[in-house]
Amino acid sequence: MDVIEAHALRLPAIDDRWTPRPYSREVLGRALEKGRVAGIATHPLDNVRGNARLLLEGDPDKQFGLTGLRDGRAVADVLDLVSVAAGEWIDPDREFGEVHIAPEPILDACEALGRRLAIAAANSERVLIATGHPGALDLLYRELEGLLLAHGGRVIKPADGTSWREPRLDHDWSIGYLSGVGLLTDGRVPRHTHRPDAMQRMLADERPGLVLADHGFAGAAIEAGVETVSVADVNDPALLVAKAQGRTNVVIVMDDHVDPGDYWPCFQAAVAAFPQVSGRGTA
């Protein structure tokens, strides 16, 4: 059994919550809060502020492969971007405390994601999907992949199996795919990563029309000028700064590391905006 197969067995089974059907926004919002996708963020304010500061100081781990993010901004400016995207105010004068994420902006952004995926499916665009958060977001991405494929979309898997070695490491890095969802592995398990280099290798192999990703996978795609729809947590502001610069349009701000089964409301919100499923006309 290879790394990806073993990882797939650890993911929860798909249940009927993932079957496309109408849900009210109230029901989806409550489910996001119950699953802690929305509500009190896992990352407290000192972590969010600290990462914003590191981003502006040029820390590569926080930049996700993006350049030009400092752009004259201060920490308070970055916190304001997070506040707006999360739908909950962050006091720039506070150092500690909770950060909150409202469900409504998540649903709005997931609907925007659904509309863009609907266009990709209708036009048979080549879509590249990848995550630096295996064990959290890959179930959602895999179901969105299925939605695309069922309605004429194309999901590509560039650089599948590509490996490389870095100095002073005792393992290779490799690119693998869970169905059509790209992952970075160390030969033992898929790895949580902010690194942009796996996406850079993917794009060198084949250039898609659209990328759905997070972390460095999303950052590298945006940096390369590929249209990207992405997910970001409140303590990962790089993609939001790129959005403020006009380099990307859809960034879903939500807790990106809860139980993978609890992202089903995000899927249903995307489905609701998908004309091929909802029957609300063509994209």
Image: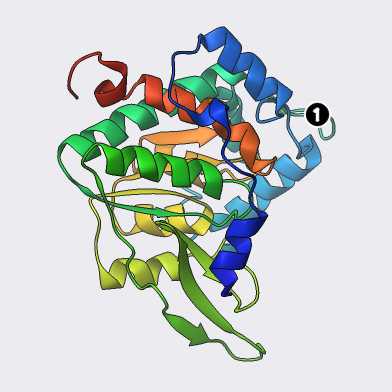
Residue under pointer 1: 98
Provide the secondary structure element on which disc 1 rests. Answer: loop
User: Percent x, y for residue 207?
Assistant: 24, 62
Front residue of 149 and 234: 149
15 on left or right of 96: left
What amino acid is labelled 1 in the image? Glu
Front residue of 88 and 49: 88
180 on left or right of 37: left
User: Percent x, y for residue 9?
Assistant: 63, 58
Work out whether residue 252 can be spotted: yes
Name the colour scheme: rainbow
Residue at left offset 67%, top offset 44%? 257
The answer to whether residue 146 is above or below residue 111 is below
Q: Quadrant of the C terminus?
A: top left
How many numbered dots are placed on residues in this image?
A: 1
Residue at left offset 80%, top offset 41%? 46
